[in-house]
Amino acid sequence: MIEIRFHGRGGQGAVLASELLAQAAFLDGKSPQSFPFFGVERRGAPVTAYTRIDDRPVRLRTSIPNPDVVVVLDPGLLGTTRVTDGIRPHGLLLVNTPKSSEELEAPDGVRRAAVDATKIALSHGLGTPMMPIVNTAVLGALARATGVVSLEALSRAIEQFVPRSPVENRLAARDGYTTVRTVEVGALLSPLPVGAPVPRPSGEGPIAVVPSETIHTAAWRTFTPKIHLERCTKCNFCWKFCPDDAIEFDPQGFPRIRLAYCKGCGICAAECPPKTIEMLETLA
C-alpha cells in the first residue's frame, strides 16, 4: 500500500487532487481511497487530504500519520506547518515551488521533488495570481516522481471528473509531469512490515488510527442500520460515506452491514438517496 498526504490551502484544490489521484489509480486497475481532513474551513486556511493506493481492497479507514509521500501545494506551509511529520524513511516530499529540489529541506533520507505548479497553472489560466489552482500540475509531477499512476490515467480522470477547463487542466498535468525536478535518495517506498506497531496519529485532532473492530466500537451501538433491499438502487453511497468500512456487498451487489465494525452512527441512512436504510434501536 502507498499512502499519500496532501497539504494545501482552501481554494487550491488539495481535496480534489486527492480524489483525482484515487480516480486515476482506479483507472489504472488499482484499489484507491481518498478523504479530506478539515479544521475551521475557510478560503486560504490549511487543508489536509489523504489518498491510499493498493493492489487489493483498502480496508483501513484512518488518517495517515506516516505517509510514503507528502505533497505540498503551497510552499508557504513549509514555514508554518510541520508537513513532513511522520514521513517514512526513503519517502518523497513534493513541493510546489520555483526553487530547485536541492534547496528543499527534508528529513534525512527523504527524496525531494520540486515543480513550479503556480507558474504552470497561471500559464493555462487556472485560477488567479492571488489563488492559482495548482492541483493538476502537482498531480502530473507526482505521477512522474513516483510512478504511482500513469499520466494517461491521470488525463482520463481529469477529463471525466474536472467540470471546468478540462483541456487546460490536462495540459497543466502534462507540464507538471515533464518539468518536475527530483533529488534521488535511495528507494522511494518502504511499507510498514506486517505486525509493525500502529504509528501514533499526527497532531490534527481526535482521529482514529486503528480499525473500529480493534477497539470494539460496535459495542457503542445504540441503533443498528437495517437495509430494505427491495428499495435499494445499488448506488453505493452507504459504502462511500461509511467512516468505519462497515459496509460490504453480497454476490448480487447489494450492500450489507458488517456489524463487528458498525457503531450505529447513522451516516449511511442520512446519505442514502432512496432512503433505503432505517436506523433501528439496538435491543440489549
Image (cartoon, rainbow, N blue to C red):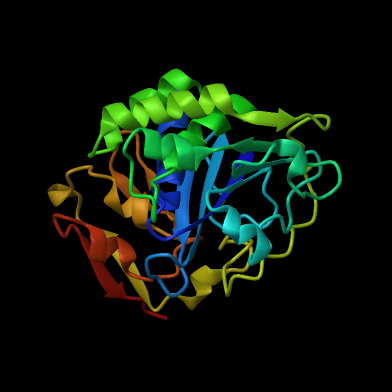
Question: How many numbered badges does the structure rendering display?
Answer: 0
Indicate the quadrant where residue 146 lies.
Answer: top right
233 on left or right of 182: left
Residue at position x 66%, y 41% from top?
A: 99
**Of the pair 98 and 185, the residue shown nearer to us:** 98
The answer to whether residue 245 shows anywhere in this view is: no
Residue 183: x and y in percent read 76, 31
Residue at position x 72%, y 59% from top?
A: 85
Residue 54: x and y in percent read 57, 34
**Of the pair 219 and 168, the residue shown nearer to us:** 168
The answer to whether residue 8 shows anywhere in this view is: yes
| Vertical arrangement, residue 4 with respect to residue 30, above or below | below
Q: Residue furthest top?
A: 152
| Vertical arrangement, residue 121 with respect to residue 203, above or below | above
Q: Which quadrant, please, contains the C terminus?
A: bottom left
161 on left or right of 205: left
Residue 160: x and y in percent read 27, 30
95 on left or right of 140: right
